[in-house]
Image (spheres, rainbow, N blue to C red):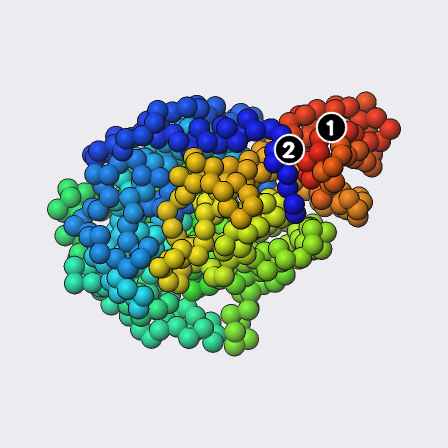
Amino acid sequence: MKLTRWTAMSLAATTLALAATGGSAAAQPTGVKKKGPPPLVAGAPAKAVQPFVWENATVYFVLTDRFNNAFTGNDLAYGRRNDAAPLRGFMGGDLAGLINKINDGYFDQLGVTAIWLTPPVEQIHAGTDEGTGKSYGFHGYWAKDFTTVDANLGTENDFRNLVEAAHAHGIRVILDVVMNHTGPVTPIDPVWPQDWVRTGPTCTYKDARTTIDCTLVDNLPDIRTDSNAEVELPPQLVEKWRREGRYTQQMQELDEFFAKTGYPRAPRYYLMKWHADWIRKFGVDGFRADTVKHVQPQVWKELRTVADAAYDDWKKANPDKKLGDKFYMTAEVYNYEIAHGQTHDLGGGTVANYYQQGFDSLINFGLVRDANQDYEALFSRYSKMLHGGALQGYSVLNYLDSHDFDPPFDAARKRPFESATKLLLAPGAAQIYYGDETARRLDAAGATGDAKLRSFMNWDELANNAQRDGYQVADVYAHWSKLGQFRRAHVAVGAGVHQQLQAKPYIFKRTYDQNGLRDKVVVALDLPTDKASVIKVYGVFANGEKVRDYYSGKTAVVRGGSVNFGTRNPIVLIGQE
């Protein structure tokens, strides 16, 4: 899709100001605050009364260590060193840096309604060679202690402030949780006892057994989530908690949990309690479950029960802070596609239905390829699956790139405008991977494998409005923001029923009518840019009704079944305020 330079350059100017903002930290962990220009734009919290449904969520997925560094004093905690292979070590991003961007209004500008952050739990302290050079647990998936915040990211108080800052802006928080494995074993990070984990065989992914009862890769101990045998705490955790002065409290909480639930003290129930604590203590709104198909399906339903109970406890204790009444869970079932409907083939004749195991949605790996289709083929197929099809009553979380799926849709960022249009207008919830909106490259030189996808956020390119392959980075952000604002204002965009109204220029409508909430929008794409377009609305909006184009910000009145905003943009996003 060819785009001209925007007439509304004020948004691009705001973008540059936000990119340059260092902000003031809401939390005050130990460290030295990085110097930078003072805040230029203060982001206003989103309206609390704005309609929200998870089926239309715009989820921003952030690797905390790679996003924004507020303090340098915690860049290398626990004696970690700056000796990793390219893009495989900690780079300094922290919770305070993420808080700054929330408070500066960065996510408000982008229309984000939920932030999914990688696990903040304490990671193994040492680096380890996983076959691609020395690596550290900057990504959050190599847990050493599930009960505390990793010092590289900040403190428990930082995490509390993060959730409260997000909620103040009407943004929900999704926590990444791992039930499948601990971190790798190193000379200073010993393996957990054998009644807790298995250390072999390595998975071969031929059937359910060789996908679940095994280790994902070498030296990644697999938690025995299949076991009902009662186990004692790993001695290294006992020693650690005693050293930190937390042992008595942790044991008291565990005793209360097992007494209340009646669960045996088996490995998976310890983990469920530890994960649920992030809900009960801080008010986390949802879980993104990692490596779902590598855990027995029924375990996730048990986790959902524990999570729901924790969310109820938090709501009762914080009635004025809640953003919603329902806890949310989405699943990473690797290679699941919307075309699979409710089932996923594990091989060997075993098919699993994860929607029936407590999940509201599954991450849709299919859009990475489906985005090569034309708009109508893509949108109509997704809508039919979600409305009247196999996924009626459920949803998917669409994405075009992530931290560990290679190749992404557009690694070299040649098509950032098309990427935004197809992702943010596709039926279903949408996941923005950090830097999608700023054309952060996904083919970092010098890195190998998934590390290529995990470069630090390109704030400098946004602040300097870098020129790239015929476009400017601030213009990319402006495009993503306009689409995101449209999604946030209208639940029909992602959650509504799709219908094509006109083939050329392409015009469609989305309508939503559930639980007393009604919404409707009309979208026109691939419009000519040499003249103002008159858009037929096909009775979706009646003559005399005032409507807004969320792309240009202009309003107009429907006359003769059409509307003319007087703009020459290739896209028009129509809805009522």
Q: x and y percent of residue 190 in the render?
A: 19, 62
- Residue drawn 37% across and 37% down? 98
- Residue drawn 79% across and 29% down? 563
Residue position for label 2 = 551
Q: x and y percent of residue 409 in the render?
A: 54, 56
The CA distance from mark 1 to mark 2 is 10 Å
Residue position for label 1 = 565
- In the displayed structure, would residue 197 be above or below residue 397? below
From the viewer's side, name the closer residue of 275 and 560.
560
Mark 1, other Cα within 10 Å: few <14 / some 14–19 / many ≥20: many
- In the displayed structure, would residue 441 be above or below residue 514? below
From the viewer's side, name the closer residue of 168 and 389.
168
Q: In this view, does 281 lie to the left or right of 477?
A: left
Q: What residue type is labelled 2?
A: Tyr
In the image, which disc is placed on residue 15?
none
Q: In what element is the residue under mark 1? A: loop
Q: x and y percent of residue 124 in the render?
A: 24, 55
Q: x and y percent of residue 450 in the render?
A: 40, 60
Mark 2, other Cα within 10 Å: few <14 / some 14–19 / many ≥20: many
